[in-house]
Image: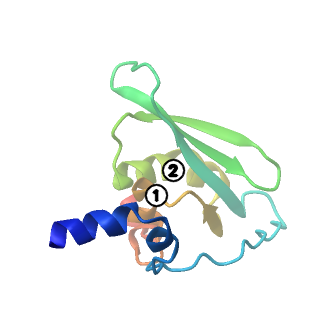
Amino acid sequence: MRDDVETYVRTCLICQQDKADHQKKAGLLQPLPIPTRPWESVSMDYISGLPKVGDLGSIIVVVDRLSKYATFIAAPKHVTAEGTAHLFFKHIVKYWGLPKDIVSDRDSRFTGVFGPSSSKSSDPSFL
C-alpha cells in the first residue's frame, strides 16, 4: 500500500504543485559596489576542459573589476584550493597587492583558501 501511495503522490499534478519548499529562499540580487581604485576588487573563475600541456589543463582567469584588465594563469587540471592560492599570490598579489574583494562563483578551489573562515590567505609565510 505504501508503494501505491508514493506512486500516486509522485504522479499527481496537484500533489506536485502543492509540495512544501524546504530550500532557503533566494534573496534579491544586489549590484556589486563599483571599485574606486585598480585591483581593489577582482573576479576569478576557471576555464577547464582544455587540452593538457604537460600537467597543465586549466586556466585561472583573474579580472580587475575597475579596469577590466585580465590575467590568465595556467594551472593543473585538478588544482587544489592551496594551489589556487599559491598561483594567485605568485601572479596577482606579487604585482598588484592583495585585493579588498574577490568575486567568484563559490567554487571549492576558491572558498577553501579565500573564504571568510580562512586565515591562510593573509599569512605571509603561506607565500
Label 2: few (<14), some (14–19) or many (≥20) C-alpha neighbours in 10 Å: many
Q: CA distance from mark 1 to mark 2?
A: 10 Å
Q: Do labels 1 and 2 touch, CB within 8 Å?
A: no
Q: In which quadrant of the rendered view does residue 108 lie?
A: bottom left
Q: Is residue 92 left or right of residue 9?
A: right
Q: Which label belongs to residue 118?
A: none
Residue 57: percent from left, percent from top: 41, 28
Q: Nearer the N terminus, badge 1 or badge 2?
A: 2
Q: Quadrant of the N terminus?
A: bottom left
Helix, strand or loop status at disc 2: helix
Disc 2 target residue: 88
Q: Amino acid at mark 2?
A: Phe
Give me the residue at 41% from left, 75% from top. Answer: 119
What kind of colouring is applied to the model shown? rainbow
Q: Is residue 112 left or right of residue 104?
A: left
Disc 1 target residue: 110
Give me the residue at 37% from left, 34% from top. Answer: 77
Residue 114: percent from left, percent from top: 47, 65
- From this view, report whether residue 29 is shown above or below residue 24: above
Q: In which quadrant of the rendered view does residue 10 lie?
A: bottom left
Q: Is residue 111 left or right of residue 91?
A: left
Residue 116: percent from left, percent from top: 48, 76
Q: Is residue 31 left or right of residue 76?
A: right
Residue closest to the eye, 74 or 57: 57
- From this view, report whether residue 72 is shown above or below residue 29: above
Give me the residue at 76% from left, 55% from top. Answer: 65
Residue closest to the eye, 41 or 18: 18
